[in-house]
Image (spheres, rainbow, N blue to C red):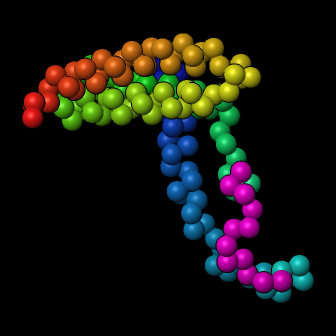
Amino acid sequence: MNSIFCRWVLLVTVSVLPSALVGCTDPDFDDSTDPNHSQPMTSWQGSAAEAAPLPSPEETLNTALILGDRADQAAHSAQTTTDWEVAAARFEQALNLLKAIPPSSEHYSSAQAKIQDYDAKLQESRRRLTALRPES
Protein backbone atom coordinates (compact mmCIF):
# COMPACT_ATOMS: atom_id res chain seq x y z
CA MET A 1 0.00 0.00 0.00
CA ASN A 2 2.83 2.37 0.86
CA SER A 3 4.35 1.82 -2.59
CA ILE A 4 1.07 2.67 -4.33
CA PHE A 5 0.69 5.78 -2.18
CA CYS A 6 4.22 6.90 -3.05
CA ARG A 7 3.51 6.38 -6.75
CA TRP A 8 0.30 8.38 -6.42
CA VAL A 9 2.09 11.24 -4.66
CA LEU A 10 4.75 11.25 -7.38
CA LEU A 11 2.15 11.36 -10.15
CA VAL A 12 0.26 14.19 -8.50
CA THR A 13 3.48 16.10 -7.93
CA VAL A 14 4.66 15.60 -11.51
CA SER A 15 1.29 16.53 -13.04
CA VAL A 16 0.18 19.34 -10.72
CA LEU A 17 3.36 21.10 -9.64
CA PRO A 18 4.28 22.67 -13.01
CA SER A 19 0.83 24.21 -13.42
CA ALA A 20 0.83 25.38 -9.81
CA LEU A 21 4.09 27.21 -10.35
CA VAL A 22 2.81 29.21 -13.33
CA GLY A 23 2.43 32.81 -12.31
CA CYS A 24 4.37 32.44 -9.07
CA THR A 25 5.96 35.85 -8.98
CA ASP A 26 6.44 38.40 -6.27
CA PRO A 27 4.48 41.53 -7.25
CA ASP A 28 6.58 43.60 -4.82
CA PHE A 29 9.85 42.58 -6.46
CA ASP A 30 11.29 45.21 -8.78
CA ASP A 31 14.62 44.40 -10.41
CA SER A 32 14.64 47.47 -12.64
CA THR A 33 17.22 49.07 -10.33
CA ASP A 34 19.54 46.09 -10.67
CA PRO A 35 22.61 47.15 -12.70
CA ASN A 36 22.71 43.69 -14.31
CA HIS A 37 19.12 44.02 -15.46
CA SER A 38 19.16 45.60 -18.90
CA GLN A 39 15.61 44.99 -20.12
CA PRO A 40 12.56 43.00 -19.18
CA MET A 41 12.54 39.45 -20.39
CA THR A 42 9.56 39.13 -22.72
CA SER A 43 10.27 35.66 -24.05
CA TRP A 44 12.30 32.65 -23.04
CA GLN A 45 15.71 32.73 -24.66
CA GLY A 46 16.95 29.31 -23.55
CA SER A 47 16.17 25.80 -24.66
CA ALA A 48 13.36 23.64 -23.33
CA ALA A 49 15.92 21.51 -21.50
CA GLU A 50 17.00 24.57 -19.53
CA ALA A 51 13.40 25.47 -18.71
CA ALA A 52 12.44 22.20 -17.03
CA PRO A 53 14.67 19.24 -16.33
CA LEU A 54 13.43 15.90 -17.60
CA PRO A 55 12.27 13.44 -14.96
CA SER A 56 14.75 10.76 -14.03
CA PRO A 57 14.26 7.23 -15.37
CA GLU A 58 13.19 6.21 -11.87
CA GLU A 59 10.52 8.93 -11.77
CA THR A 60 9.40 7.99 -15.27
CA LEU A 61 9.13 4.33 -14.27
CA ASN A 62 7.17 5.17 -11.12
CA THR A 63 4.75 7.39 -13.02
CA ALA A 64 4.29 4.66 -15.65
CA LEU A 65 3.57 2.11 -12.92
CA ILE A 66 0.97 4.40 -11.37
CA LEU A 67 -0.72 4.82 -14.75
CA GLY A 68 -0.52 1.08 -15.33
CA ASP A 69 -2.13 0.40 -11.94
CA ARG A 70 -4.91 2.84 -12.78
CA ALA A 71 -5.36 1.22 -16.18
CA ASP A 72 -5.62 -2.19 -14.52
CA GLN A 73 -8.24 -0.87 -12.11
CA ALA A 74 -10.19 0.70 -14.96
CA ALA A 75 -10.03 -2.54 -16.98
CA HIS A 76 -11.19 -4.70 -14.06
CA SER A 77 -14.32 -2.61 -13.59
CA ALA A 78 -14.92 -1.73 -17.26
CA GLN A 79 -18.38 -2.37 -18.64
CA THR A 80 -18.96 0.29 -21.28
CA THR A 81 -17.04 1.49 -24.32
CA THR A 82 -16.06 4.60 -22.39
CA ASP A 83 -14.64 2.46 -19.58
CA TRP A 84 -12.55 0.46 -22.03
CA GLU A 85 -11.41 3.64 -23.81
CA VAL A 86 -10.16 5.01 -20.48
CA ALA A 87 -8.33 1.78 -19.69
CA ALA A 88 -6.74 1.66 -23.15
CA ALA A 89 -5.68 5.32 -22.97
CA ARG A 90 -4.02 4.78 -19.60
CA PHE A 91 -2.18 1.69 -20.84
CA GLU A 92 -0.98 3.73 -23.85
CA GLN A 93 0.26 6.53 -21.59
CA ALA A 94 2.08 4.06 -19.37
CA LEU A 95 3.64 2.38 -22.40
CA ASN A 96 4.84 5.69 -23.82
CA LEU A 97 6.56 6.53 -20.55
CA LEU A 98 8.15 3.09 -20.29
CA LYS A 99 9.46 3.33 -23.85
CA ALA A 100 11.15 6.63 -22.95
CA ILE A 101 13.44 4.96 -20.40
CA PRO A 102 16.88 4.72 -22.01
CA PRO A 103 18.75 1.40 -22.32
CA SER A 104 21.56 2.84 -20.20
CA SER A 105 19.23 3.16 -17.19
CA GLU A 106 19.25 0.64 -14.37
CA HIS A 107 15.44 0.67 -14.70
CA TYR A 108 15.47 -0.39 -18.36
CA SER A 109 14.92 -4.12 -17.75
CA SER A 110 12.00 -3.41 -15.39
CA ALA A 111 10.53 -1.09 -18.00
CA GLN A 112 10.88 -3.72 -20.74
CA ALA A 113 9.08 -6.32 -18.62
CA LYS A 114 6.22 -3.90 -17.95
CA ILE A 115 6.07 -2.97 -21.63
CA GLN A 116 5.26 -6.58 -22.48
CA ASP A 117 2.69 -6.78 -19.69
CA TYR A 118 0.96 -3.47 -20.49
CA ASP A 119 1.06 -4.08 -24.24
CA ALA A 120 -0.83 -7.37 -23.79
CA LYS A 121 -3.37 -5.60 -21.56
CA LEU A 122 -3.71 -2.76 -24.07
CA GLN A 123 -4.45 -5.27 -26.85
CA GLU A 124 -7.07 -6.96 -24.65
CA SER A 125 -8.65 -3.59 -23.85
CA ARG A 126 -8.83 -2.75 -27.55
CA ARG A 127 -10.32 -6.18 -28.30
CA ARG A 128 -13.02 -5.64 -25.66
CA LEU A 129 -13.65 -2.13 -26.94
CA THR A 130 -14.09 -3.38 -30.50
CA ALA A 131 -16.47 -6.10 -29.32
CA LEU A 132 -18.67 -3.50 -27.57
CA ARG A 133 -18.80 -1.02 -30.44
CA PRO A 134 -21.76 -1.40 -32.77
CA GLU A 135 -20.87 -2.39 -36.31
CA SER A 136 -21.40 0.32 -38.92
Per the image, is 108 magenta?
no
Could you say which is closer to the camera, residue 98 or residue 59? 98
Quarter-wise, where is residue 107 in the image?
A: top right
Residue placed at 43% from the left, 19% from the top? 118
| Magenta-colored stretch includes residue 39 | yes
Residue at horizontal 33%, vertical 29%?
Answer: 88
Q: Identify the residue at image location x=32%, y=29%.
A: 87
Instruction: Place residue 68 in its image quadrant.
Output: top left
Q: Where is residue 36, by image quadrant?
A: bottom right
Of residues 36 and 6, the one nearer the viewer is 36
Q: Main secondary structure of the magenta part?
A: loop
Q: Residue at x 56, y 27 (%)?
A: 99
On the question of residue 21 being in view, the answer is yes
Nearest the eye: 88 or 60: 88
In the picture, measured across the screen, residue 124 lies left or right of residue 37, that is left
Can residue 9 be seen from the camera position used here? no
Question: Is 28 left, or right, of 13 in this rendering?
Answer: right
Q: Quadrant of the C terminus?
A: top left
Residue at the extreme right: 35
Magenta residues, start to end? 38-49
Q: Position of residue 91 (x, y in %)?
A: 40, 27
Provide residue 134's location: percent of width, then percent of height: 9, 31
